[in-house]
Image (cartoon, rainbow, N blue to C red):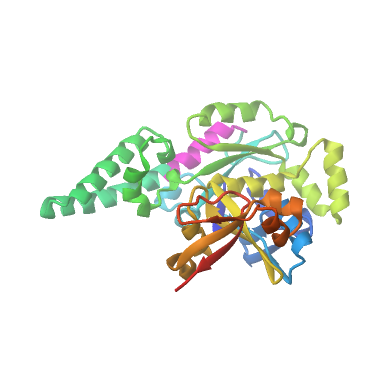
Amino acid sequence: MSLQCGIVGLPNVGKSSLFNAVSSAKAQSANFPFCTIEPNVGTITVPDERINKLTEIADPENVVPTTIEIVDIAGLVKGASKGDGLGNQFLGNIRSTHAILHVLRCFDDDNIIHVDGSVDPIRDKEIIDTELQLKDLETLDNRISKTQKQARTGGDKDALKALEVCEQFKAHLEKGLNARSLEMDAERRALIADLSLLTDKPVMYVCNVDPDSANTGNQYVEKVREVVKDEDAEILIISAAIESEIAELESFEDRQLFLEELGLENSGVEKLIQGAYNLLNYITYFTVGKKEVRAWTITNGIKAPQAAGVIHTDFEKGFIRAEVIAYDDYVELGSESACRDAGKLRVEGKEYIVKDGDCMHFRFNV
């Protein structure tokens, strides 16, 4: 399952600085490599100490960690929803992503001119929100027009339900609210899931602060917290200035020492990557063997056959059972055979809900 997150924000808020820090191979330890797909797209592994532990135990020929794609989307300007600046390209790039990392400038610096002349993360947020909401309203109006014709001509009950949902979202957006904040059950929301509404995507607000505020935040961050409290969104405090310095250091040991001196446990980039992975409620299960140790990404709450289908559709179609060892048991006992002898290997059927960290083998017949 490929996860793609778009970094968005106004010009000069630190968005590209964060992308550059992520894209620096030196910014992560050796087993978190980054590769560039396009000038503004990169793939990086999700930091997960568990795959390192399993690799130590199994000593496999190959290791495949979980990855995410980070997209540095062109800076937005007012009027993007009407095509101003790189508006159409910007909005099209957001639509293709699974989640949004919205960078807000939360620091003062006279040497870095803000596009609107002053530092105000709430105003900045509202500018981008407005452009995305306007684009979503355009999308909804097009669907409403099409669905009304279907409902009138054929009396299609599904069309009538979808029309009602579209109108609810439209009314919500017209109040200046993002689609993600509209309370609605999953079944009704699924009726227009194919629209990929921009303001319905999961979002993390990345507050780019000065180095002295990297641990605790500042008054700008508190304002952001207050404004987004009803959005079901995450907030991450990060200093692009610190991350740029970390990216300049050659060794993992130097980077860790630098973080310790600042009183930080992890780099902001690492927290950003892990936060992006968690944003969509994803978890990881592992397959462990001599040939390969591999991490597989699934949505939290899915059952064993669907988890098997991530490996190959035949695994889901012909699913018989899953052999499961909890990660903690695998590490404590040191091998699959030891877990089997200790009764820690479980046989689970089609209704088993996969847990984060499960080590699994699937039996299937096609």
Tell whether 240 sits left or right of 98. Answer: right
Q: What x and y, as percent, mark residue 142?
A: 28, 52
The stretch of residues the image draws in magenta is: 119-132
Q: Is residue 235 magenta?
A: no
> Which image quadrant is residue 216 in?
top right
Image quarter (top left, top right, bottom left or bottom right) of the C terminus: bottom left
Tell whether 121 sits left or right of 261. Answer: left
Q: Nearer the viewer, residue 111 or 124?
A: 124
Q: Nearer the viewer, residue 14 or 260?
A: 260
Q: Residue at x 53, y 43 (%)?
A: 203
Q: What x and y, as percent, mark residue 341?
A: 70, 57
> Which image quadrant is residue 240 in?
top right
Q: Is residue 180 above or below residue 320?
A: above
Q: What x and y, as percent, mark residue 217?
A: 69, 30
Q: What x and y, as percent, mark residue 54?
A: 73, 58
Q: Is residue 93 visible?
A: no
Q: How many marks?
A: 0
Q: Residue at x 68, y 67 (%)?
A: 289
Q: Is residue 328 visible?
A: yes
Tell whether 147 sits left or right of 93. Answer: left
Residue at the farthest bottom position? 366
Main secondary-structure element of the magenta-colored stretch:
helix
Q: Residue at x 75, y 46 (%)?
A: 243
Q: Is residue 126 magenta?
A: yes
